[in-house]
Amino acid sequence: MERPVIHVDPLTVKADGPQRMKLRTCLGIVTCDKVDVTCNNWKQFPVTQKDMIWEDIQVFQLNVECCCNML
């Protein structure tokens, strides 16, 4: 299965293009499923759970253009 390509605007760091709603839906589902509602500090969130979330997000191919020259 081919991963949907999501383009991310480097200036706004927001997804754009036709697949952005799929990404948004996926992130919402993953967040509700894997992040406790009482979590208020991402740095204290267990690394093992962060890794599981990252694996779920990998179904998408995120394309972010480098904006290093703009800094």
Image (tube, helix red, strand yellow):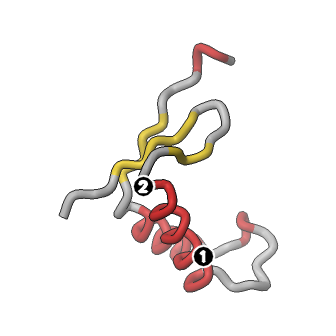
Say which residue appears at 69% left-offset and 85% top-offset.
36
Q: Position of residue 42 (x, y in %)?
A: 72, 66
Q: Secondary structure at mark 2?
A: loop
Q: Is residue 20 left or right of residue 68?
A: left
Residue toward you, 62 or 34 = 62
Kindly identify which residue carries mark 2: 19
Q: Quadrant of residue 57?
A: bottom left
For the N terminus, the quadrant is bottom left
Numbered-mark total: 2
Asked whether the beta carbons under mark 1 and mark 2 sit within 8 Å of each other, the answer is no
Say which residue appears at 49% left-offset and 55% top-offset.
20
Q: Secondary structure at mark 1?
A: helix
Q: Position of residue 56 (x, y in %)?
A: 42, 70
- Image position of 68 with respect to 28: above or below: above
Q: CA distance from mark 1 to mark 2?
A: 18 Å
Q: Is residue 55 left or right of residue 30?
A: left
Numbered label attached to residue 31 = 1
Q: Is residue 7 left or right of residue 67?
A: left
Q: Position of residue 50 (x, y in %)?
A: 55, 69
**View extreme (left): residue:** 1
* Label 2 packing within 10 angstroms: few (<14), some (14-19), many (20+): some
Q: Amino acid at mark 2?
A: Gln
Which one is in front in this view, the residue at disc 1 or the one at disc 2?
Answer: 2
Say which residue appears at 38% left-offset and 57% top-offset.
60
* Label 1 packing within 10 angstroms: few (<14), some (14-19), many (20+): few
For the C terminus, the quadrant is top right
Say which residue appears at 42% left-offset and 48% top-offset.
6
Numbered label attached to residue 62 = none
